Amino acid sequence: MKSVLSLRDVEAMAQAGKDVRALTADALLTPSARDFVRDLGTGGSSPLNARPSAVVAASAPVTVTAKSTPAELEAFFSSPAMQRLKEQICDIGRRMWQRAYVDGNGGNIAIRVADDLALCTPTLVSKGFMKPEDMCLVDLEGNQLAGVKKRTSEILMHLQIMKRQPRAKATVHCHPPYSTGFAVAGVEPPTCMIPEFEVFASVAIAPYRTPGTPEMGKLVADLVDKHNTILMANHGVVSWSHNDVEDAYFKMEILEAYCRTVLVASQLGKPVQTMTATQLKDLLKIKQNLGIPDPRYGLKECELCDNNEWRPGVTCAAPAGNVTGDGGAPNPQAEALVQAITEQILKGLRA
């Protein structure tokens, strides 16, 4: 079986001076890793030209910190590398808005750009119409250090995820309707149905708390060691990625398409077909090689496809035939009573 290489793997190889373009024959590449290698082969003179999110991760170590001078922070915030990340955040925001994953000024995005710094979206701005100059720079406590507009009020949740899960480079929060429907119902999506969902997403539900509060952020952060996509009860969804903001958004698309498909399948009047535990185990091996968390690693096969709590709903229907006391045969006494009442009414009308 060929090994699976992620974007992080090929970036590390490029930094070590290896020819990453020769990897395709000997390994399976994730979509982001494949894009990285492809861009190198189409004129990119450096790995840093391949993806906006690779600029910070693969360039010389960032020396700016939350304790840097205002002038240093402003220079960093206005640098070409930050500009590319701002543009990518705006692109992801437009895609969320176009797919109706957000409404009004809902949703927010963040990406870690230094040990104690993150770039994030502003408050009270539609994700479909953000501009690079709207972005904000904050420290890991939520203090705004640069940017004209005020940072999102929900940044504390993103930062708590990043502090609890050091691998979390980027986070995306929005309100996709099908996934949010599961969150409102308090139902985790069933498993063992679609490979893409099994490989790229790992879902749990966090109890409801007021959005933007430390309590909400803590309940989400408590789950991110083993899950990368969290349903927030009565609120929405947040996902994180160890690669970049686009990868975090991909998890949102995958979850929303999955929840929609599951709901459609549950209405077709037939039991849904699921993959076997052995088939799921193969997918979990790929998932683990990609560095994606999942609480099912190490479970026995008999424990992998447990959907006992999944209840796709109930069907209500009137029973066929007469409504009778014995469940089928006509009730003579009831019929005699109806006949007597009918005759009495007719007699009164003729009088």
Image (cartoon, rainbow, N blue to C red):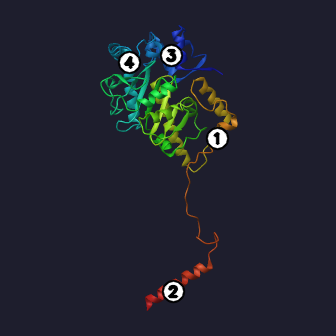
Mark 4 belongs to which amino acid?
A: Met
Considering only order in the chain, which callout, 4 or 3, is on the residue closer to the N terminus? Answer: 3
Residue 264 rendering spot, x and y as whole percentages: 52, 45
Image point (56%, 26%), residue name: 292
Instruction: Give the residue pinned by disc 4.
Output: 82
Q: Please report contact status of discs 2 and 4: CB closer than 8 Å, yes or no.
A: no
Q: Quadrant of residue 13?
A: top right
Instruction: Give the residue pinned by disc 1.
Output: 306
Q: What is the number of the mark on residue 105?
A: none
Q: Comparing marks 3 and 4, which lies closer to the viewer? A: 4
Determine whether the residue tagged by mark 4 lies in a helix, strand or loop: helix
Question: Is there any visible trace of residue 247 in the rendered image?
Answer: no
Considering only order in the chain, which callout, 1 or 2, is on the residue closer to the N terminus? Answer: 1
Image point (57%, 51%), residue name: 269
Taking depth in this image into account, of 304 and 207 the one nearest to the observer is 207
Mark 2 belongs to which amino acid?
A: Glu
Instruction: Give the residue pinned by disc 3.
Output: 37
Judge from the rendering whether residue 92 lies leftward or rightward of residue 37; answer left or right.
left
Q: Is residue 182 above or below residue 89?
A: below
Question: Is there any visible trace of residue 237 in the rendered image?
Answer: yes
Instruction: Give the residue pinned by disc 2.
Output: 343
Q: Please report contact status of discs 3 and 2: CB closer than 8 Å, yes or no.
A: no
Q: CA distance from mark 2 to mark 4?
A: 90 Å
Would you call the spot at circle 3 few (<14 residues within 10 Å), some (14-19), or many (20 or more)? many
Q: CA distance from mark 3 to mark 4?
A: 23 Å
Q: CA distance from mark 3 to mark 2?
A: 90 Å
Considering only order in the chain, which callout, 2 or 3, is on the residue closer to the N terminus? Answer: 3
